Amino acid sequence: AAVSASLRTKAQAHNITLLDLIVRLYDLTKRIPEDTTDESSNKNVISISGQDSSVAVIAQKQKAIQPALRNLESLVDLILGDYLAAAAKALEAVLARMHRENFSSGDPSSTQYVNISLDSDVADDREDVIESSAYMDTFGDAVSVLCREHLDKLPNQHTIVQRLRQRLLCRVIVLFLRNVCMIRPLDSKGRLRLVRDLTLFEEAILPLAPSCRQEKTDELANLFEELRSLRKLLMINPAYENENALKSYRELVYTKKTRLSSVLLLIFASAPPELRSPHDQLRMSPERFGEWMDKAENGKDPTNIALLDSGTRRNRSLEDAVCKLVTAELDRYMQRVSAKVKSQSTDQLSLASEYHLLRKLV
């Protein structure tokens, strides 16, 4: 049953009751080796290996119950994985609204980059006076409803549920990163607004996986690092100080603080219309292009959070697929500009600064 920002249905309530029973059974099964072994009667008995016999018996029983535990984990993944994937889909629809908003004033003077140090008081002051976007207000409300009506009613004391909620958080971060990097056009004021949105996003998503406050998986830690890097990416203007921008991009990519695909997509934000973004090349909306990226990275649609590889940077398939699209567009752009120069009988070949940056990165 689809999860949306609404009261949960009877079917959803039934599934969560079933989920609670399964995780209780999992915990009881996990305790069988200790609960069924009498240590006192074996305390003076030593096994052939020199190990206390009760410890050896417990180890044997633990090995014996592993298949049953894996089957129970699979049931949890099946029920809760589908449930949380639907939740992620509902939040994705809210995040996609950012593409309906205007992040460029259309004023030529506003495209002049405002160089702000993100560690300075000036940056903080600028962020405070920038209003948040409408989609972010809606997103915060949607997360609150989702937690109150759905997530908080899960058997959250169990580590299996906590693990899957962290996977949900990973998925939502990936969706936010992708959508922000596909916004176009984007001027200096729009960049500042997105930096403000990023701060609000980080605050809004924490209730999705409360356990991450104490301990984050490696995947989740990497994605929070990418969020911090996105703030830096937004303050790099590819249209000016070309070599400095290139150096900054390479540093973020080579130190594995962000993905190359994120950098490439974001560079298109300030490029001229003749240089088409990857989703425009495929005649897709940003949301549909996100589905294309899922298939390129995972080989399937994200219909189950438990089965989704949502944050690893070791998977090169997505990066290679985006680079291939960008390279093809750069070649077409060069041909169009060259043809235009030839038709005008001039030797002056004027290429966008974003073209040169993209050429050096792919």
Image (cartoon, rainbow, N blue to C red):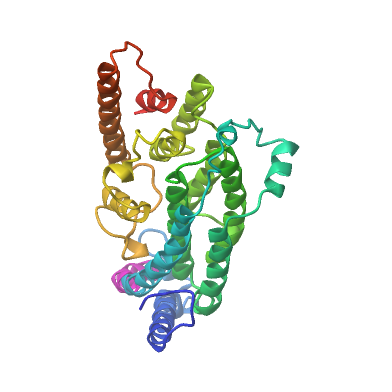
Which residue corresponds to the image point at 61% horizontal and 43% vertical from the top-left?
Answer: 192
Report how many numbered discs are placed on residues in the image: 0
- Above/below status of 148 relative to 101: below
Instruction: Please indicate, yes or no, whether residue 52 appears anywhere in the rendered image.
Output: no
Asked whether residue 305 is drawn in magenta, I would say no
Q: Position of residue 266 (x, y in %)?
A: 44, 39
- Above/below status of 345 relative to 71: above
The image quadrant of residue 50 is: bottom left
In the image: residue 272, left or right of residue 345:
right
**Which one is in front, 212 or 304?**
304
- Above/below status of 313 relative to 70: above
Q: Position of residue 342 (x, y in %)?
A: 25, 17
The image quadrant of residue 61 is: bottom left
Which residue corresponds to the image point at 36% horizontal and 13% vertical from the top-left?
Answer: 348
Instruction: Please indicate, yes or no, whether residue 194 appears anywhere in the rendered image.
Output: yes
Quarter holding the N terminus is bottom left
Asked whether residue 65 is drawn in magenta, I would say yes
Name the outermost residue toward the top: 347
Quarter holding the C terminus is top left
The prevailing secondary structure element of the residues shown in magenta is helix
Instruction: Give, as a single range, the part of the protein colored magenta.
Output: 58-72
**Which one is in front, 275 or 116?**
275
Q: Position of residue 353 (x, y in %)?
A: 43, 24
Which residue corresponds to the image point at 38% horizontal and 42% vertical from the top-left?
Answer: 313
